[in-house]
Image: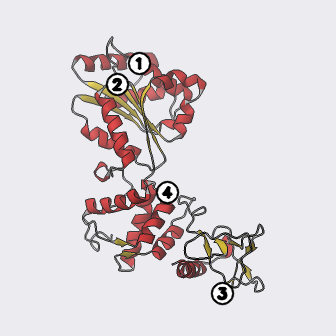
């Protein structure tokens, strides 16, 4: 929709795990090297973990592109399966017949297939995504598959990909044998602030123009703080930012625009707004005296109370916070002038826009 306006050949922030857009952050490069080494050295079990949206699937697809034609791959993405259903799914993806086959026959078919691949000089790799959803019984079944081996080589390499909860699952006593067989473990860390900025520019460059839009320094920092450096959340926010910039016919992304988009896309708490320092910030308030216990929090000067957008409260360095009040025109900070309490359920869209504009003026 906005590609032509920004001179882009395609959308730069789609949520599809496209390996072409894989940004080589420090953590992603490290994980890629580990995976390359593990596959090349025929490690039995490989574990890849990371937060939701950290780029695990994209990295795995990037790895698959680099693997040669001498490798047969089975990919499992639906992991809410019983042990027998899991074996059936693995065999199906390897191209084996599964109709009417019992679990015993499924395992025999898989073993025969792996021996045949080994005899022909080919390797077999099993990739299980969202592995944190596997039941302990299914994980034990996966461990048993690692017993398929010759005297000097594993017949099947297994890559488990999952969220951090997978490590908690594997830490249970009944899975200690599986845990001990993991040769390589790599965890994808969120991007840093500098990596977030480079990530955004990198994707714009791949899509056709690194300078399609210009982010103010404050806007870039807001994107990082809201997303916490998670690539998927960065993509969601930046896609909306480009759409908003297109609608306003501008190529400049401001802090105000980021705040507006963050509020509009904050469904199911996906962005880290409630605890973000930029939305729980201290401001000047001449009409409220600072208590002796209040501490400066900025190099800009003495700041003497804070406003919390989530709770609609202000404090002046004391333990007891007072409620901010809102009338139809602006925000009233005076404790004596109390009208409508600022609460999420009674703030209209126009009020929210007014609040954002007010605080952007106060902060910057």
Seen at 45% across and 66% down, the residue is: 221
Q: Can residue 358 be seen in this view?
A: yes
Upstream in sequence: badge 4 or badge 1: 1
Horizontal and vertical percent for residue 223? 46, 64
Upstream in sequence: badge 2 or badge 3: 2
Q: How crowded is mark 1: few (under 14 residues within 10 Å), some or many (20 or more)?
A: some
Q: Name the residue under label 1.
A: 107
Viewer-nearest residue: 147 or 230: 230
Single out the mark in the foreground, 4 or 2.
4
Q: Evaluate if marks 4 and 3 touch, with contact meaning CB atoms under 8 Å apart.
A: no
Upstream in sequence: badge 1 or badge 3: 1
Upstream in sequence: badge 4 or badge 2: 2
Above/below status of 333 relative to 321: below
Quarter holding the N terminus is: bottom left
Where is residue 301, by image quadrant?
bottom right
Above/below status of 57 relative to 357: above
Q: Name the residue under label 4.
A: 228
* Separation of marks 4 and 3 at Cα, in angstroms: 34 Å
Label 1: element kind? helix
Label 4: element kind? loop
């Amino acid at each position: 929709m906005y590609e032509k306006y920004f001179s882009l050949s395609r959308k730069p922030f789609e949520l599809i795990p496209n390996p072409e857009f894989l940004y080589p952050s420090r953590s992603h490069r490290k994980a890629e090297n580990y995976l390359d080494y593990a596959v090349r050295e025929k490690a039995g079990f490989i574990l890849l973990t990371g937060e939701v949206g950290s780029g695990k699937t994209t990295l795995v697809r990037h790895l698959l592109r680099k693997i040669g034609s001498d490798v047969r791959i089975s990919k499992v993405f639906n992991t809410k399966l019983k042990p027998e259903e899991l074996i059936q799914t693995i065999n199906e993806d390897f191209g084996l017949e599964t109709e009417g086959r019992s679990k015993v026959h499924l395992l025999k078919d898989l073993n025969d297939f792996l021996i045949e691949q080994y005899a022909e000089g080919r390797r077999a790799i099993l990739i299980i995504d969202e592995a944190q959803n596997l039941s302990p019984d299914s994980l034990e079944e996966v461990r048993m598959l690692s017993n398929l081996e010759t005297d000097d080589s594993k017949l099947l390499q297994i890559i488990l990909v999952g969220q951090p909860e997978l490590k908690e699952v594997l830490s249970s006593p009944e899975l200690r044998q599986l845990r001990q067989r993991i040769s390589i473990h790599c965890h994808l860390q969120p991007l840093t602030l500098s990596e977030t900025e480079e990530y955004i520019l990198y994707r714009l460059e791949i899509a056709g123009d690194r300078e399609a839009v210009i982010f103010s320094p404050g806007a870039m920092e807001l994107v990082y703080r809201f997303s916490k450096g998670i690539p998927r959340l960065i993509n969601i926010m930046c896609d909306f930012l480009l759409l908003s910039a297109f609608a306003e016919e501008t190529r400049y992304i401001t802090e105000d625009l980021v705040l507006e988009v963050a509020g509009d896309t904050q469904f199911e708490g996906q962005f880290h707004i409630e605890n973000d320092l930029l939305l729980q910030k201290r401001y000047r308030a001449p009409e409220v005296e600072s208590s002796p216990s209040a501490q400066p929090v900025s190099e800009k000067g003495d700041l003497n109370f804070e406003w919390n957008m989530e709770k609609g409260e202000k404090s002046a360095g004391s333990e007891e916070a007072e409620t901010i009040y809102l009338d139809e025109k602006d925000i009233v900070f005076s404790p004596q002038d109390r009208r409508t309490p600022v609460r999420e359920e009674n703030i209209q869209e126009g009020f929210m826009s007014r609040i954002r504009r007010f605080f952007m003026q106060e902060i910057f």
